[in-house]
Amino acid sequence: MIEKMCEMSIGYNKWFFSYLGGEPLMNGKEYFKNMFDIIQAQSEKYYTPYTHRVTTNGLLLDDEWIQLLNEHNCKLIFSYDGLGFGKKGSKKAHDLIAKYAKDIHVVQVVVSATNCAHIVDIYKELEALGIRRINTQYEIYASEEDYLNFAKHTIELFKYIDSLAKVKTACSCTMMRKQLPLVSWQVSMVASLSIVDC
């Protein structure tokens, strides 16, 4: 099936493969090794560069997974909603983020009625763990009142970041990149906010 997808994509400048939905790591390491090998062969056959990314709650991560993903340049997107907030806020997930922070491309936080009042604390937590990129998305089935609350707390997050001495003393984006995750705002159908390097 992957071979057919690649064949149908001849002429595109780049292929983008994203593994998500449920928990993709439950497919196992052999599945991913096979998938990576097939895509590599198709890329060479059709002279098309590609990129991979996997979105996971991270609970199955271990050194072997990290090595496999790194060997195949597969970007790791770690779903985490802040320590203590649901299944994606477990102590185990927190500890795995701390252990693999340098290997995580981005931490994705879904802002909900449960955790929105703690978004500044979640930002501080992830920064302290060494995370450089944080993508926050608003819960898509939230009420209008919840969205107003999300906006209020998002503004608090911007004010907090703006108040940091690191931001006030940095003279350029290049200097700030090394000091803390920076904020840019994207508005889409799911109203996402990204906290990323500039």
Image (tube, rainbow, N blue to C red):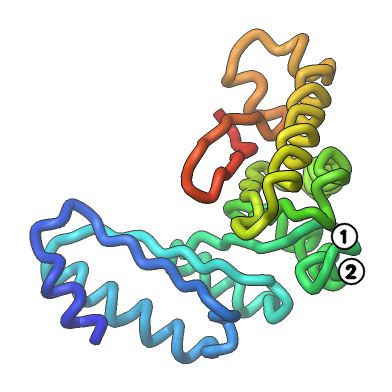
| Location of residue 99 with respect to 196 vertically, above or below | below
Provide the residue designation for mark 1. Answer: 83
Asked if the residue at tag 2 contacts the one at tag 1, i.e. Cβ–Cβ closer than 8 Å, the answer is: yes
Residue 103 visible in the shown view: no
* Spot occupied by residue 45 in the image (x, y as percentages of width and height): 12, 72
Taking depth in this image into account, of 37 and 2 the one nearest to the observer is 2
SS for dot 2:
helix
Please tell me which residue is depicted at 50% across the width and 60% down the height of the picture: 75
Q: Measured from the top left, where is residue 129 in percent x and y?
A: 81, 50
Give the label on residue 91, or none.
Answer: 2
Q: Is residue 54 left or right of residue 136?
A: left
Q: Residue at x 54, y 80 (%)?
A: 24
Question: Are there few (<14), some (14-19), or many (20+) residues within 10 Å of tag 2?
Answer: few
Query: Is the N terminus in the top left, top right, bottom left or bottom right quadrant?
Result: bottom left
- Residue 59 position (above or below residue 176): below
Occupied quadrant, residue 61: bottom right
Q: Is residue 125 above or below residue 160?
A: below
Image coords of residue 109 (percent x, y): 69, 54
Say which residue appears at 78% left-offset and 40% top-offset.
Answer: 149
Q: Amino acid at mark 1?
A: Leu
The kind of residue on which mark 2 rests is: Lys
Q: Residue at x 85, y 63 (%)?
A: 85
